Amino acid sequence: MATSLDTGVPWIMCQQANAPDPIINTCNSFYCDQFTPNSDNKPKMWTENWSGWFLAFGGAVPYRPVEDLAFAVARFFQRGGTFQNYYMYHGGTNFGRTTGGPFISTSYDYDAPIDEYGDIRQPKWGHLKDLHKAIKLCEEALIASDPTITSPGPNLETAVYKTGAVCSAFLANIGMSDATVTFNGNSYHLPGWSVSILPDCKNVVLNTAKVNTASMISSFATESLKEKVDSLDSSSSGWSWISEPVGISTPDAFTKSGLLEQINTTADRSDYLWYSLSIVYED
């Protein structure tokens, strides 16, 4: 159906190894450097790079170190990647009673570079910015050639993109221990689980394990509480609350046998459905 529409733009299918030509199958994961599309005619695309995870009720708050996230991105482009998309780059919130699934909280912050309140999360945001600046410096070589990948030692890998006099390289240490690698006659120190980016095949402009962006620590300030009768108030800076009548002394009270379905009864206007029961006891 999709291809028969003849839209003139490529279709993609996430996680679909048997996507028929010309539809492009792509990768969704924490790591996609080892992914290969199902045809040599299709680009290597990463449609969901998970910057964190969603929050489940009763579970720990998800956290993915930026060093690991940057390592995954650098490895992807080191091994011929053409496109990657962060999921999520900006966290969000499900308002009302909607969530992403059973037992998932309404917070969809996802430990993203921009949190669910719209604030920059450092050092994740800044380090990724530096990473993409470094990859951008390799652009001329990346778009002109395929990488030549070699392994100079255990858990070590070099990838060279070269066209004419233009040369860019990635040096990767996929082990947990620090290592030293010799490349083009020069010696380079690689921390464990890191990638060094050399836009000119000589000078390291960034190593994914070395974060130069300062961390930010959130602080909380108290604000005064004001009563707000209507749902839309001219002031949007402070907390507010709405006074709801308690009990059955309201004009909406009615008599009904048995328990009621709450959301249908309250029309989702209140979190409370009050019951009153009378018992006549004869001795």
Image: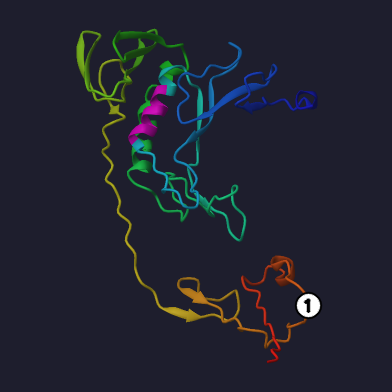
The spot of residue 266 in percent (x, y) is: 70, 72
Position of residue 267 in the picture relative to residue 31 (left or right): right
Position of residue 2 in the picture relative to residue 129 (left or right): right
Query: Who's the residue at 34% across and 38% down the image?
Result: 127
Q: Main secondary structure of the magenta part?
A: helix
Give the amino acid at mark 1: Lys
* Helix, strand or loop at mark 1: loop
Colour scheme of the picture: rainbow
Q: Give the range drawn in magenta.
A: 67-75
The spot of residue 150 in percent (x, y) is: 35, 8
Query: Who's the residue at 60% across and 74% down the image?
Result: 231
Against 153, residue 44 (above or below) is below
Q: Which residue lies furthest to the bottom in this view?
A: 283
Q: Nearer the viewer, residue 247 or 258?
A: 258
The spot of residue 263 in percent (x, y) is: 70, 66
Position of residue 54 in the picture relative to residue 24 (left or right): left
Residue 97's image quarter? bottom right
Residue bearing mark 1? 256
Query: Who's the residue at 46% across and 71% down the image?
Result: 237
Residue 199's image quarter? top left
Q: Which of 166 and 100 is in front in this view?
A: 100
The spot of residue 98 in percent (x, y) is: 62, 55
As for residue 74 lying within the magenta part, the answer is: yes
Query: Who's the residue at 42% across and 28% down the image?
Result: 73
- Is residue 136 in view? no
**Mark 1 surroundings within 10 Å by alpha-carbon count, few (fewer than 14), some (14 through 19), many (20 or more):** few
Q: Which of 190 and 169 is in front in this view?
A: 190
In the picture, the quarter occupied by the N terminus is top right
- Is residue 220 in view? yes
